[in-house]
Image (cartoon, rainbow, N blue to C red):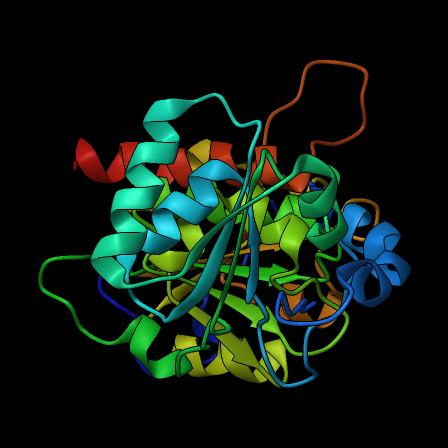
Amino acid sequence: MNRPQNRTKSTRGRSNSGARGQGSSKSSAGSGNPRRRTQGNRNQGGSGKATPKRDGLGGDHIEGRQAVRELLRAGTRRTQQVLISEDVHDMAVLAEIADLCEERRVPLRQLSRRKLDDYALTDSHQGVIAQAEPIRSVVLETLVSENPKKLPMVVVLDGITDPRNLGAVLRTAEVAGVTGVVLPRHRAARLTPAAVKAAAGAVEHLPIALVAGLPAAIKEMSDKGLWIIGLDESAESSIYDMRVATEPLAVVLGAEGEGISHLIKQRCDQLVAIPQSGQIASLNVSNAAAITIYEIKRRREIK
């Protein structure tokens, strides 16, 4: 199928098809009493609902061994400091993090477990916390620009408000080679500590565009030659019937219950569903994303 250019609704060949998934803070560790700074937000951080700056993605507070280790390995943004609990017994992880801190000239501090808990913004920091510059969003155009080494596959998240689900989707997307993710500026999860931890380092490598409105962003991607595939559990077509899996495309996923919005559906070239044989009505968005992304990846590899 030829790449679409300046397509009109009459030529898009839209058909129904997907599965709904669940769209399922900064802390300074400088001087002063950390408990006073963070205790009021601990429940928010634990649930992943701490809110970053209005116009930013967040991601400046990182918890968990894998997320902190990948932050240091990538070196794509400045790390201000790393805090480690004295009772962490995984010496291999400690040694690698310590070596990376020395290499990057990042201050490393060891604290008691209780003291580290005062800095934590999630329920399970695994004894390692870092603070770094926030993640910077990229311009949407960079996600759809021509790259002879990588066929565009963009993931668009519509109304995903659960940070842990966001993190899980980002982790799958990065591992599968997705070229970028698009998030709406409003009514969507950002890179809270819970999201960054669930992403397990994916945020250090995966370009993320933060856009004012998804309909306009989808139109821009369509105009740039990407086919738009929407995942919708009521669709008649299956993900195995995607006509453009081997073409430049964007996959739109919505929140559990609501799915993708009506306006977004209208802008899709094809709606597809994940076949289901059980009794549960729908899949979590991170699971739905993994199934769909890897089906596209499989189709491309056997092309």
The residue furthest top is 278
Up-down relation of residue 30 to residue 167 (above or below):
below
Whether residue 7 is visible here, answered yes or no, is: no
Task: Give coordinates of residue 301: x percent, y percent.
Answer: 19, 35
- Image-quadrant location for residue 37: bottom right
Q: Quadrant of residue 141?
A: bottom left
- Front in this rendered view, residue 39 or 53: 39
Query: 105 left or right of 118?
Result: left
Q: Is residue 150 left or right of residue 244?
A: left
At a point 90% along the width and 61% down the height, the residue shown is 40
- Near-viewer residue (79 or 242): 79
Q: Residue at x 51, y 46 (%)?
A: 199
In the image shown, does 30 or 267 lie closer to the viewer?
30
Residue 263 place in picture, x, y as percent:
71, 72
Q: Say which quarter of the image contains residue 172.
A: top left
Q: Quadrant of the C terminus?
A: top left
Q: 114 or 120: nearer the eye?
A: 114
Q: Image quadrant for the N terminus?
A: bottom left
> Is 150 positioned to the left or the right of 251 in the image?
left
137 to 258, vertically: above or below: below
Q: Position of residue 29 (x, y in %)?
A: 62, 65
Figure disc tally? 0
Q: Is residue 86 visible?
A: yes
- Check the image and report above or below for 26 versus 283: below
Q: Residue at x 53, y 41 (%)?
A: 289
Q: Could you say where residue 137 lies in the image, as x and y percent from the top left?
A: 46, 77
